[in-house]
Amino acid sequence: MTLLVFALLAYLLGSVSFAVISSWIFKLPDPRTYGSKNPGATNVLRSGKKAAAVLTLLGDAGKGWVAVILAQTYATTWELGNETVAVVALAVFLGHVFPVFLRFQGGKGVATAVGVLLGLNLWIGLMAIGTWILVVLIWRISSLSALVAAALAPVYAGAILGFEGSTLAVLLMSLVLIWRHQSNIVNLLAGKEGRIGEKKSPGT
């Protein structure tokens, strides 16, 4: 019963959309009404307000980190096993992707996944971030960077944590994240995915 409470609280925390909150704070349009219509930092950046995008990024990553750290802290107090941390990690991520407050239409989960990874193990999170940065520097495609980092995150988790519940949670998060990028994958295969800093021509 306690495990279900932990999972529910983590899911509700994950359902808090910082893209919507930051847009409201900076008096910007709802991020679900323009661009990719994705309530995430990348789409908020399209509004031209970098501060709003940064707040979104930090908020979405922060909620993933906070959920995992609290689970790690209180799981022992409540005499719960390591599976509690794994369940909470997955629940906060799914809350972001399928938020009850936004009719289950949430973001793609990149920032929240990074926050979760940093909470589970600092090195796993840093390795995922490093992978993202490396791919961006080479190809300048944000979605490709996220996909490569997502694909390698379970490998990093397995190498550092071993094959335990948290590693399985990372694997499931990666699969959902990759699935959420299906439209980007189609564009990548067609050579149509935009690059960072690339200006679109009029009418596109």
Image (cartoon, helix red, strand yellow):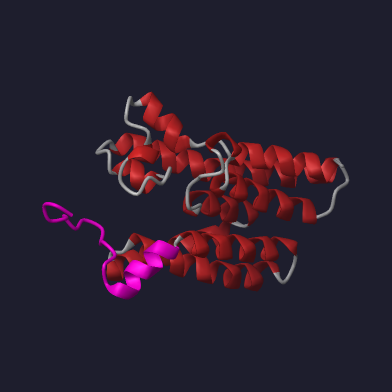
Q: Residue at x 37, y 31 (%)?
A: 23
Q: Residue at x 11, y 52 (%)?
A: 202
Pick the quarter of the image with the C terminus: bottom left
Could one spot residue 92 in this view of the protein? yes
Q: Nearer the viewer, residue 13 or 68?
A: 13
| Magenta-drawn stretch contains 61 | no
Horizontal and vertical percent position of residue 21? 45, 30
Horizontal and vertical percent position of residue 90? 66, 53
Pick the quarter of the image with the N terminus: top right
The picture quadrant where one finds residue 16 is top right
Disc count in the image? 0
Horizontal and vertical percent position of residue 79? 88, 46
Q: Nearer the viewer, residue 198 or 36?
A: 36
Q: Residue at x 16, y 55 (%)?
A: 199
Please give the range of residues in magenta: 182-204
- Prevailing SS of the magenta stretch: loop
Q: Is residue 45 above or below residue 166?
A: above
Left or right, 61 with reference to 4 = left
Could one spot residue 127 in this view of the protein? no
Q: Residue at x 61, y 50 (%)?
A: 94
Left or right, 204 with reference to 142 = left
Left or right, 180 with reference to 94 = left
Q: Nearer the viewer, residue 159 or 182?
A: 182
Horizontal and vertical percent position of residue 13? 62, 37
Q: Is residue 202 above or below residue 142?
A: above
Q: Is residue 127 above or below residue 18?
A: below
